[in-house]
Image: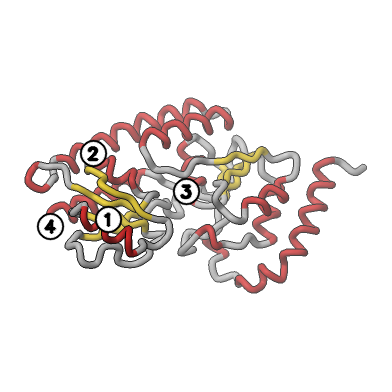
Amino acid sequence: MSTPRTRRRASVVALSAALALTAAGCGDDDKSDSSSGSGGKKGGPVVVATTTWEGAFAKAAGAEDVTVLVPPSTQHAPDYDPKPSDLAAVAKADFVLYAPFEPYADKIKDAAGSDAELVKVNLDNDAGKVRGEVTRLGGLFGTKGAAARWSKTFDREYAKLSKDLKASWPGGRSPAVVSQVFTTWSARMAGARTVGTYGPEAVTASQLAGLSAKKPALVLDNAHMSTGKVLPDSGAEQVKIVNYPGKDLELLPVYREAAAQLKKAMKGA
């Protein structure tokens, strides 16, 4: 007998076939990177996340069975084109996490069909927004306790990193920074004064003049969307900030790495 799930899987096969030619052009070099961040299927909901960023939010919220579609080695995740195997994984999920700015979101929605619950995730490493998303996802997954425990650990670690960064201010004064729009969270962690933002497009000539006039000590660039040297003649040191977690789907190392880069830069400011 035909059921909603079998009909949905049939539609996924058809969609996968339509995408097969495009997928073949992508190759399989990164296939081993598109894997579960928890080492295999566990109890609880089956979660598919488009990138390690959404995957890390899911893991923090208590999900144990998390599959990531976009390989961590992908330089610019929004450019990724889903493979038929990705769409098949989506079809088996209880929850599918994605960000609305990802161009392939519509393909993911089509593959999810009627059974998987589609969840938009606010991808922002601002501490308050991370806590809010992790708590929300914990409620959806039925893992509120795990999400609460992670948030307590996160709060302790974040407070330590922030305190250490503030103790490293050059001359004991909060540094002025210019930040790419998706890396302002790192400025807040450091207690820096954000005097201007740019992006995600490259800085224009008029923006360059305006941002340089702010006399920033640091430029916080997005490692995943870099447009090169932002203020080349301003004397500001450019700091590369990484937003996406690694294959382990751990968020805390993202904050530790950003803190290490900022501390190093402030020593030379």
Dot 2 or dot 1, earlier in sequence: 2
- Residue 95 x %, y %: 63, 40
Residue that badge 2 annotates: 162
Three-letter code, disc 1 = Gly
Dot 2 or dot 3, earlier in sequence: 3
Three-letter code, disc 2 = Ser
Visual colour scheme? secondary structure
Would you say 141 lies left or right of 166 here? right
Helix, strand or loop at label 4? It is: helix
Cβ–Cβ under 8 Å for marks 3 and 4: no
Query: Against 215, is 43 above or below?
Result: above
Q: Counting other residues with Cα less than 10 Å from the Cα at mark 4, is it few (<14), some (14-19), or many (20 or more)?
A: few
- In front: 86, or 100? 100
Distance CA(mark 3)–CA(mark 4): 31 Å
Q: Which of the labelled discs sits on residue 53, or is there none?
A: 3
Distance CA(mark 3)–CA(mark 1): 32 Å
- Residue 266 x %, y %: 16, 52
Q: Counting other residues with Cα less than 10 Å from the Cα at mark 1, is it few (<14), some (14-19), or many (20 or more)?
A: few
